[in-house]
């Protein structure tokens, strides 16, 4: 038997992957199996769940997770391992690939199994081009959020597998979770994103006003979330941040560098507000206002209120 | 302390054009050191400057990839290994040959990467190379401290920060907020060409562990941007009214 295995430490993504694994399994006439490292995590999975248990907790450490997945792949026989394209997932996939000698298709959507190969589409060159990648089976695919829809299903049959793993060589000393604002830009319908056009942190109140008027969520380009530290990483839209596709994306004071555009170009409607008519953001926008955000935002909020 | 930093010479994605069939015009396209790799070089050189040791830059590529190596040497690396790959390799093969080149460089305490390359941004080569070298790996480092044969790092993860440590030798990937890369002076650029650079072929690095097969790129196609690109250039009030009307028609407000 040869299964499509799936794993992500991100619960929502894990459910999406289990739906993806089920879809691929139908196409490749095999089985699907969602791997979990914590028994409470499998609820809602599409298809059978395999709970992996080590002597100590496995989740959260890429060395342990990779070893556990390898043990599951050996026990079940696997043609494809789907892993959530998170920071931990990339490290798990990297280690697993070397241990098992498997290729990795990264950040792929639209996966297909055909002629003993797995193919998938991904963006390259900061999202300006799409590439179809292909790897012989067995292989690993890193799959981002939104590639599959989590589908509801009845209680999934659950099995347990005891795995023996070498202890991790990384010592985890301290977790500093983010402040519990719990913003999830990936599920937002409307995003107002702020960029370098804002001169100081206090001025973000203007963007927040628009967020409130529209019932949206505040996002940011990289300088604001990392270099300046005005906003948290959870609001960073872009290649190295979060990939979003809301119905409405309003970029305020963002010039439109490729790295930012890569994270928002699939939004349904894009609006740009920028004082520089030549700013590249207008090239990827449906509607643009050329003007100073310090004048445009108050005016826009006035119109929205009336 | 002996440090190896791995850099990629990548196509400048902002300058890349599509031909009439929508394929990227890679022939003659501008290339440069992958942006984030400059932070990796900076961190390696900074670490060396605060203690004794050498920094070796390793880069696998072809064509004019030595330009990036020279830039890293100008930024303060001491010597280089240039792996001539002939053509593009997938992450598994790239990491395998990088690991062999790292071994060839001699005893090493720390291998430094960036979080991903600017052209494909997979974030795979770093953890893979670490695994080939059987080194512990710490990914997405935003701050680090080395001492007593250990490296302690603050990691920038999705759900927050984590403090983690590993014994040396180890491998890490750094995020770009860890530092601001220096710009070499003209003198440093000139001196860089005198630093030792060893060019090696894939054949000379290959052993029985070399991966076979791998990921291939079947087709690359430009993403067509079909946006309305309607600009409002009136007074803030006029433009705002027109925008809100447009958004109403789209059913968005």
Image (spheres, coloured by chain):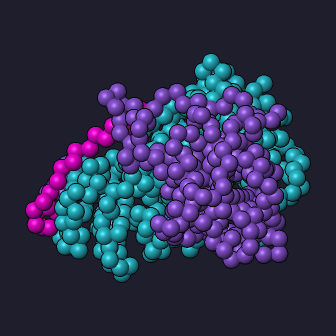
The percent position of residue B48, horizontal first and vertical second, equals 69, 70
Q: Is residue B154 visible?
A: yes
Chain A is which colour? Answer: cyan
Looking at the image, is A169 positioned above or below residue B143? above
Where, quadrant-wise, is the N terminus of chain B in this rendering? bottom right
At x 55%, y 43%, the residue is A107
How many numbered callouts? 0
At x 59%, y 30%, the residue is B216
Q: Nearer the viewer, residue A176 or A162?
A: A176
In the rendered image, residue A246 lying in the magenta stretch gets the answer no
Where, quadrant-wise, is the C terminus of chain B in this rendering? bottom left
At x 19%, y 73%, the residue is A295
Chain B is which colour? Answer: purple
Q: Check the image and name the residue furthest to the bottom.
A: A202
At x 87%, y 50%, the residue is A165
In the rendered image, residue B223 lying in the magenta stretch gets the answer yes
Q: Check the image and name the residue furthest to the top.
A: A115
The percent position of residue B179, horizontal first and vertical second, equals 55, 71
The percent position of residue A53, horizontal first and vertical second, equals 84, 50
In the shown orientation, is residue B112 left or right of residue B69? Answer: right
The segment highlighted magenta reads B221-241
In the shown orientation, is residue B2 left or right of residue B121? Answer: right
Q: Is residue B173 visible?
A: no
Q: Nearer the viewer, residue A246 or B150?
A: B150
Q: Quadrant of residue A26?
A: top right
The percent position of residue B157, horizontal first and vertical second, equals 61, 63
């Amino acid at each position: 038997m040869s299964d499509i295995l799936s794993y992500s430490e991100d619960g929502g993504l894990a459910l999406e992957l289990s739906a993806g694994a089920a879809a691929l399994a139908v196409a490749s006439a095999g089985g699907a199996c969602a791997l979990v490292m914590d028994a409470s995590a499998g609820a809602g999975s599409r298809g059978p769940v395999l709970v992996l248990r080590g002597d100590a907790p496995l989740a959260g450490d890429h060395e342990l997770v990779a070893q556990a997945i390898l043990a599951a792949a050996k026990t079940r026989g696997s043609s494809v391992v789907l892993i959530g394209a998170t920071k931990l997932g990339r490290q798990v996939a990297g280690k697993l690939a070397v241990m098992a000698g498997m290729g990795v298709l990264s950040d792929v959507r639209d996966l297909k199994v055909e002629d003993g190969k797995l193919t998938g589409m991904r963006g390259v060159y900061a999202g300006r081009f799409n590439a179809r990648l292909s790897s012989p089976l067995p292989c690993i695919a890193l799959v981002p959020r939104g590639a599959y829809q989590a589908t509801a299903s009845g209680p999934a049959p659950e099995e347990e597998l005891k795995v023996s793993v070498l202890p991790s060589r990384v010592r985890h000393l301290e977790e500093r979770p983010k402040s519990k604002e719990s913003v999830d830009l990936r599920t937002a319908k409307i995003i107002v994103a702020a960029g370098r056009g804002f001169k100081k942190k206090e001025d973000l109140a203007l963007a927040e006003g628009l967020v409130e008027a529209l019932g949206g969520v505040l996002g940011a380009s990289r300088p604001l979330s990392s270099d300046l530290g005005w906003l948290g990483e959870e609001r960073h839209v872009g290649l190295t941040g979060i990939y979003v596709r809301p119905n409405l994306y309003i970029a305020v004071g963002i010039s439109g560098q490729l790295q930012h555009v890569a994270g928002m170009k699939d939004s349904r409607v894009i609006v740009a507000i920028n004082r520089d008519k030549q700013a590249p953001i207008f090239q990827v926008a449906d509607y643009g206002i050329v003007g100073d955000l310090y004048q445009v935002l108050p005016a826009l909020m006035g119109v929205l209120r009336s | 302390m002996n440090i190896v930093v791995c850099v990629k010479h990548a196509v400048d994605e902002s300058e890349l054009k599509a031909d009439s069939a929508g394929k990227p015009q890679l022939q003659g396209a501008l290339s440069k050191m992958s942006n984030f790799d400059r932070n990796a070089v900076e961190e390696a050189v900074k670490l060396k400057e605060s203690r004794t040791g050498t920094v070796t830059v390793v880069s696998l590529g072809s064509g004019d990839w030595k330009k990036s190596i020279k830039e890293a040497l100008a930024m303060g690396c001491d010597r280089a290994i240039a792996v001539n790959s002939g053509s593009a390799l997938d992450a598994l093969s790239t990491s395998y040959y990088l690991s062999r080149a790292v071994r060839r460089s001699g005893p090493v305490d720390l291998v430094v990467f960036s979080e991903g390359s600017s052209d494909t941004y997979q974030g795979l080569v770093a953890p893979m190379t670490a695994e080939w070298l059987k080194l512990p790996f710490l990914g997405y480092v935003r701050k680090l401290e080395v001492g007593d044969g250990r490296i302690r790092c603050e990691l920038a993860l999705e759900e927050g920060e984590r403090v983690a440590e590993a014994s040396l030798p180890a491998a890490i990937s750094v995020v770009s907020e860890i530092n601001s890369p220096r710009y070499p002076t003209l003198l440093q650029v000139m001196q860089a060409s005198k630093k030792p650079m060893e060019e090696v072929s894939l054949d000379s690095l290959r052993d029985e562990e070399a991966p076979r097969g791998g990921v291939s790129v079947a087709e690359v196609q430009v993403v067509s941007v079909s946006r309305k690109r309607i600009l409002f250039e009136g007074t803030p009030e006029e433009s705002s009214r027109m925008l809100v009307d447009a958004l109403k028609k789209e059913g968005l407000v």
